[in-house]
Image: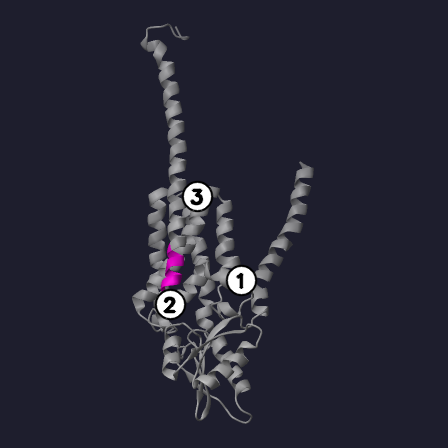
């Protein structure tokens, strides 16, 4: 027994710092390496001048993915449809930069700085925020802060259903009902009270609910097939990877590769992008994140039903075995054979 206790002590001393180190790396490393990586932007104006500007921007070691537009209006439309984060417009009066702080205040500041660097000496570029962040949250910090509670809500709901012993259809109903409540409460706080969202109220509520359901169903589904260890795996996907890899506080294209891409395939990252689309861009570019969240939710709920049926089958098999044993024991008496008690 002392040897077993010693091994557990050594394991705790070694493994806990390793886990904490990995968590710190997951949260700190992406933000410590923020820089544009194939960031989609536009350049608009006369063809020759636009081509030269696009070439200069393209020389920044893959920092920008530049699309040229014939007019400023076309570039504005691309920003509103979330095809690009912003655009540089060459006008007769000088360089003009179009930004969308609602998409990412960090990128908007980055483009403003880049415009100043590419403007003629002594000239000050004009800045136009096409889709501005709400005045209650101009830097997007409040929206970014909502990501972690949403991730934790998914973990808590999924773990709660598992630990309460709810299985099968009852677990599915609980998960859907909980996610619906989270959607309503989350929108009431962020839209009605804080005013940091400005889109359709029900679309925002649906986004919160679908994001919470994707996370909670994943946790509960993994737990249904893997046991309690599934809760840990679901927590890793939602919190330790999903939160720092989401890019909600900056932009996925600013994170190191492949973190930015991976984060958009996880519930929190896709939920953050969907929330921006419905809150500030009239639902543009919402289909991709919505499909991702729906896939996580359906996969998790399917695992919940599968795990519930498997446990039901195991219990049913045990009952059948017990019942057949009882019938065998009763057969001698039914045939009139003597029993041990006589």
Residue 339 or 200: which is nearer the viewer?
A: 200
What kind of secondary structure does the magenta stretch mostly adopt? helix
Q: What residue would you read off at disc 3?
A: 224
Circle 1 sits in a helix, a strand or a loop, which is it?
A: helix
Tell me which segment is drawn in magenta.
Answer: 286-294
- Badge 1 is on which residue? 259
Q: Is residue 287 magenta?
A: yes
The residue identified by callout 2 is 285
Q: CA distance from mark 3 to mark 2?
A: 34 Å
Label 3: few (<14), some or many (≥20) within 10 Å?
A: many
Between the residue at mark 2 and the residue at mark 1, the CA separation in whole angstroms equals 21 Å
Residue in the image at 41% along x and 75% along y = 102
Task: Locate residue 285 relative to residue 126 in the image: left or right.
Answer: left
Is residue 325 positioned above or below 195 on the image?
above
**Which quadrant would the N terminus be assigned to in this image?**
top right
Q: Nearer the viewer, mark 3 or mark 2?
A: 2
Is the C-beta separation of discs 1 and 3 under 8 Å?
Answer: no
Residue 277, horizontal then vertical, whole percent: 37, 69
Q: Nearer the viewer, residue 57 or 242?
A: 57
From mark 1 to mark 3, how far is it between C-alphas?
A: 28 Å
Q: Nearer the viewer, residue 271 or 7?
A: 271
Q: Is residue 66 left or right of residue 284?
A: right
Residue 73 is a magenta residue: no
Residue drawn at the location 53% of the way across and 62% of the way down? 259
Residue ID at (44%, 66%): 146
Q: Is residue 21 shown to the viewer in this render?
A: yes
Nearer the observer: mark 1 or 3; the answer is 1
């Amino acid at each position: 027994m002392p040897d077993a206790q010693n091994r557990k002590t050594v394991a705790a001393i070694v493994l806990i710092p390793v886990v904490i180190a990995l968590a710190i790396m997951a949260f700190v490393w992406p933000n410590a390496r923020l820089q544009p990586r194939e960031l989609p932007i536009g350049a608009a104006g006369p063809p020759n001048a636009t081509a030269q500007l696009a070439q200069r921007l393209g020389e920044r070691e893959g920092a920008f993915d530049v699309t040229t537009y014939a007019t400023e209006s076309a570039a504005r439309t691309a920003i509103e449809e979330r095809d690009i984060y912003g655009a540089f417009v060459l006008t007769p009066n000088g360089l003009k930069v179009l930004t969308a702080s609602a998409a990412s205040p960090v990128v908007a500041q980055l483009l403003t700085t880049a415009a100043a660097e590419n403007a003629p000496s002594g000239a000050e570029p004009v800045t136009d925020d096409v889709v501005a962040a709400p005045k209650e949250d101009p830097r997007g910090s409040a929206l970014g802060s909502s990501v972690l509670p949403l991730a934790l809500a998914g973990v808590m709901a999924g773990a709660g259903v598992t630990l309460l012993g709810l299985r099968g259809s009852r677990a599915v109903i609980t998960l859907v009902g909980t996610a619906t409540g989270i959607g309503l409460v989350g929108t009431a706080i962020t839209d009605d009270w804080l005013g940091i969202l400005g889109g359709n109220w029900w679309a925002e509520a649906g986004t919160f609910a679908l994001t919470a359901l994707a996370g909670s169903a994943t946790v509960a589904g993994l737990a249904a097939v893997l046991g309690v260890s599934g809760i840990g795996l679901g927590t890793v996907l939602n919190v330790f990877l999903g939160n720092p890899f989401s890019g909600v506080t900056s932009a996925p294209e600013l994170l190191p590769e492949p973190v930015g891409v991976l984060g958009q395939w996880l519930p929190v990252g896709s939920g953050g992008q969907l929330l921006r689309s419905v809150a500030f861009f009239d639902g543009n570019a919402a289909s991709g994140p919505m499909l991702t969240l729906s896939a996580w939710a359906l996969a998790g709920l399917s695992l919940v039903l599968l795990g519930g049926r498997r446990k039901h089958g195991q219990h049913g098999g045990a009952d059948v075995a017990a019942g057949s044993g009882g019938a065998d024991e009763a057969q001698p008496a039914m045939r009139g054979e003597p029993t041990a008690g006589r």
